[in-house]
Image (cartoon, rainbow, N blue to C red):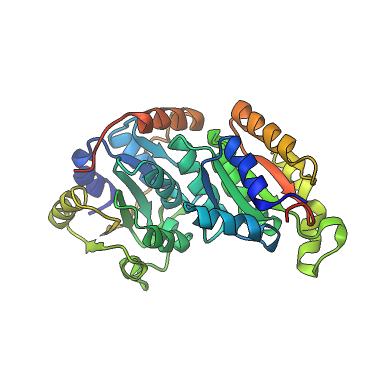
Amino acid sequence: MVTAPDFLRFLLDAGFDFFTGVPCSLVQSLIALLEERGGYIPETREDAAIGLAAGASLAGKQPLVIMQNSGLGVCLNALASLSLLYHLPCLLLITWRGYQGKDAPEHRIMGDILPTLLATLQIPHRILGAATVPDAIRWATETLRQSRQPVALLLPPGVLQ
Amino acid sequence: MNLADALAVLVPLLRDELVVHANGFISRESFTLSDRPGNFYMIGSMGLASSIALGVALNRPERRVVVFDGDGNILMNLGSVALIGATQPQNLVHVVFDNEAYGSTGNQRTISAQVALEEIARASGYPRVRRVDTAPALLSTAQEFLAQPGPSFLLIKIEPDREERQISRITHTPPQIAARFRAEVSQQRSAIS
């Protein structure tokens, strides 16, 4: 397991400097740490968070948007007709509820289709594991800087402490 | 007063302001009247103009940011009004052109005839809120709001355009719109008096 302070340090070292999102229990330690540090913007919906991140990117920031995979469904049009269309990069940290079919019923369908949905949107993504977090964040940062588009890191249960 | 009339009052007042435009006729009418590098035209992602503007405003507190929003747009994203109230960006001027209709899809009605949008802004904590329905009131209020700390909310009641407007679409590509706006944002200017 990776601790929240380590996870945040990897993000800060990679240049992320604007943080927003909608919470999930799988990232409560990270959001608590961001709130303690100051500057985290608690958004009301995931698509609005994509809009906020788009503005931050236009203002020269490197934004991170935190959401549960249920929220990916909310922000499909924001990603398609704003971030992807205008070449506005942001890192999506998406928690993976319904991972391997083991979760509450409301998470099963989105849990099953998550990687397929991102592939359909042509959003590059990697799945985080306890040992691969620094590498994945480095990959995501390089990819979003080169591609000028959103990149996703998927966070299954049991990776972030 | 229709949308073009209201823009004809507002646009000449703009100097270094960064202006995020909602999609549809708001973008197209403003682009046709006066295209400027500090204009961001949102052609898709309906509802998100105020979120984009807030993202710029929070990160460039020394620049004044204006959002040209519509009633249909803001009704899709009332959480954004709440978040602007919660974060209190003093450099943000939120203008809503309220024609009580979804203009670019054929003037189907919105619910803004029944709901006072400016009261939602007031309840959310915008310190300056005004509803105007004449050009002189628009001029004096816009002059005041562009000079004073916000966040401020200016609701402009306008007539819907009854006949289909023969008006240009945005001719820049979306990446071009983003690139020139980004360059404009990075300029060191102080529009906040």
The number of numbered discs placed on residues in the rendered structure image is 0
Q: Is residue A117 above or below residue B15?
A: below
Where is residue B100? Give x, y as percent: 36, 62
Q: Position of residue B187 (x, y in %)?
A: 33, 29
Q: Quadrant of residue A112?
A: bottom right
Q: Give the quarter of the image for residue B181.
A: top left
In percent of width and height, residue B142 lies at 19, 51
> Which residue appears at 70% of the width and 55% of the height?
A69
Residue A110 vertical placement versus B111 (above, below): above
Asked if residue A142 can be seen in this view, the reply is yes
Left or right: A52, with B61 as reference point: right
Report the residue at 44% width, 54% height from top. B106
Q: Quadrant of the N terminus of chain B?
A: bottom left
Extreme residue in the bottom direction = B114
At 59% across and 48% down in the image, what residue appears? Answer: A65
Q: Can you say which quadrant of the picture contains the C terminus of chain B?
A: top left
Q: Residue at horizontal 35%, vertical 36%?
A: B39
Compare residues A5 and B86 and report the one nearer the observer: A5
| Residue B24 in sight in this render | no
- Provide residue A12's location: percent of width, then percent of height: 57, 40
Asked whether B30 or A52 is in front, the reply is A52
